[in-house]
Image (cartoon, rainbow, N blue to C red):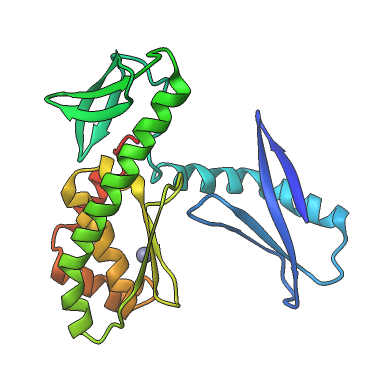
């Protein structure tokens, strides 16, 4: 069941699940999903009441996790706009040309297309450029770090790439590592942090002491890299 919980000018969407547990609980996850677990038999009215009581706390949690998410200004895909690659800014330059293409040229992203005012097409070209560069680069970085983890006893992971809005990467229990293709907008040392972090999960699935000790051994300055990543604009 989904509950829309008004809070100030916002509306918080809560997924309510019923569980065998006796206590009512609310969790806000880093991807900003809000999950409430209600004991079996708990009626809708008392669920709403409990959620209203905790609304301020839920909103605070959501705000807390929001700061760790990539910054996403609205993109217009017009000349002069700033776009990022490996932590550097490039200006968009759109030219009229029969054959469509995208190239990095000096400090510019140069897009050529038949109708320079066609923003939808410009966006499509840019996304295509990012996604193909991301797959190559992320795969390369991952291959560079992987042998160490295989020696530690990890089994070969399955790597998937996807454009995501809310997280940089994930590692599932079944050994699937998912990397956000938007990572190529971040500096290389931030990219390496995300990759090494996810690879450490092949050895220790949870964020426990042993996990952080391994991460620290490989990247003594991982906290600095993480902080920088939080300021990346995608
Ligand atoms: Zn993690």
Give whichever of 199, 176 is nearer the camera: 176
Q: Is residue 160 left or right of residue 97?
A: right
Residue located at (42% from left, 32% from top)? 124
Vertical placement of residue 129 versus 160, above or below:
above
Question: Could you tell me which residue is drawn at 31 percent across and 83 percent down?
Answer: 155
Residue 152 % position (x, y): 21, 84
Q: Nearer the viewer, residue 44 or 168?
A: 168
Task: Examine the rendering and report whether any part of residue 127 can be seen.
Answer: yes
Q: How many marks?
A: 0
Q: Nearer the viewer, residue 229 or 39?
A: 229
Q: Residue 96's image quarter?
A: top left
* Residue 163 percent across, percent down from the top left: 42, 47
| View quadrant of ligand 1 | bottom left
Q: In the rendered view of the protein, which quadrant contains the N terminus? A: bottom right
Position in image of residue 234 (x %, y %): 35, 36
Residue 73 in view (yes/no): no
Residue at 44% x, 20% y: name it. 119
């Amino acid at each position: 069941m989904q509950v829309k919980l008004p809070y100030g000018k916002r509306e918080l969407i809560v997924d309510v699940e019923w569980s065998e547990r006796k206590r009512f609980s609310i969790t806000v996850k880093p991807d900003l999903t809000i999950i409430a677990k209600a004991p079996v038999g708990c009626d809708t009215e008392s669920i709403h009441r409990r959620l209203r009581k905790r609304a301020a706390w839920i909103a605070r949690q959501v705000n807390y996790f929001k700061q760790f998410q990539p910054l996403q200004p609205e993109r217009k895909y017009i000349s002069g706009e700033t776009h990022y690659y490996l932590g550097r800014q490039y200006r968009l330059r759109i030219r009229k040309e029969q054959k469509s293409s995208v190239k990095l040229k000096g400090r510019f992203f140069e897009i050529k297309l038949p109708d320079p005012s066609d923003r939808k097409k410009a966006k499509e070209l840019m996304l295509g450029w990012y996604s193909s560069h991301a797959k190559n680069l992320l795969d390369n970085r991952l291959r560079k770090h992987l042998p160490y983890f295989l020696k530690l006893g990890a089994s070969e992971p399955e790597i998937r790439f996807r454009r995501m809005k809310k997280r940089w990467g994930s590692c599932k229990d079944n050994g699937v590592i998912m990397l956000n293709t938007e990572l190529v907008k971040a500096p290389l040392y931030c990219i390496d942090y995300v990759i090494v972090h996810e690879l450490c999960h092949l050895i220790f699935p949870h964020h426990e002491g042993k996990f952080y000790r391994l991460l620290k051994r490989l990247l003594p300055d991982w906290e600095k890299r993480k902080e920088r990543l939080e300021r990346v604009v995608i």
